[in-house]
Amino acid sequence: MLLVIDIGNTNMLVGVYEGKKLTHHWRLETKKERTADELGIFFKELFQFAELDLKAVEEIIISNVVPPMEFSLQRMCERYFKKKAVFVDASMSSPIKIGLQNPEQIGADRIVNAVAGVHFYGAPLIIVDFGTATTFDYINKNKVYRGGCITPGIAVSNEALVQKASKLPQVEIKKPKRVIGRETIESMQSGIFYGYIGMVDAIVKKIQEEAKVKCPVIATGGFLSLITQSSKTIQKADPFLTLEGLRLMAVSLKNRRKLHPPTRRGRS
């Protein structure tokens, strides 16, 4: 059994795999202040609810963009699962290459998204991930990650609007009935929704123009269904792209260990 964990700034996505099959998954709130024991009890309850045994977990792989949580996550895995977790970063061998001047700056979630994207949809490819931030990633035909774009997520944009404009209320983010809003809430929903759709499509088109290529555009992330229903550039939604990327990274690492097993030093 493989446990995969994606830690984002707003949500953490957890999955359990039996071979290639995703048998269980949960989307949960990220709480940076949780200790190793709090995380351990939390995971124990999840597993009990799903009738899973902690001892059945053979490997754990994590993508994490919240550095303060790494120590607690590692301690939790060692104490409750009796396993040392692997944390994805740009220094790891993977099925794609990172073609950036400073590869250590790339988020682990973007690496695993690219790995899964290329595996399932080929290259070249554009991946749009709707999270706390919305990220756009471009992988060229040679499976080289060439970079992308980062924008405030739709929820962050909505919160900033409400905080900075005193008379504007908090509104539900959804597709409105019309573009021309007839009262404040409808006008805000229209601006947030259609403004964001327009931004996403414009950035995708600009990436394709700059890269001089027409390629598939895959979307993932928490606000996936809201945006993809009206986007003119996104062709497929894949809610578990990040989890699949973590699984593929685990497989890649296992195969690499088989090809290059650690050497044992005998006594002299």
Image: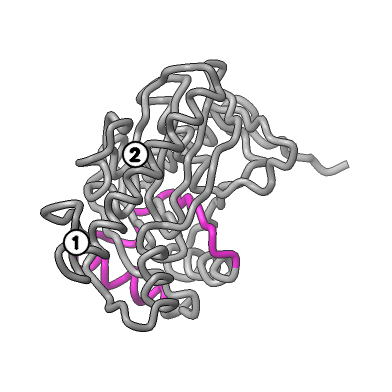
Question: Relative to residue 17, is residue 252 drawn left or right?
Answer: right
Question: Relative to residue 259, is residue 178 drawn left or right?
Answer: left
Residues rendered magenta in the picture: 39-67
Q: Residue at x 37, y 47 (%)?
A: 2
Element at label 1:
loop
Question: Which numbered marker is on residue 219?
Answer: 2
Q: Residue at x 24, y 71 (%)?
A: 171
Q: Amino acid at mark 1?
A: Ala
Whether residue 101 appears in magenta in the rendering, the answer is: no
Q: Position of residue 77 (x, y in %)?
A: 48, 64
Question: Which of pointers 2 and 1 lies earlier in the amino acid sequence?
Answer: 1
Q: Position of residue 153 (x, y in %)?
A: 41, 57
Whether residue 50 appears in magenta in the rendering, the answer is: yes
Q: Amino acid at mark 2?
A: Ala
Question: Which numbered marker is on residue 50?
Answer: 1
Q: Position of residue 231 (x, y in %)?
A: 27, 38
Residue placed most toward the observer, 19 or 7: 7
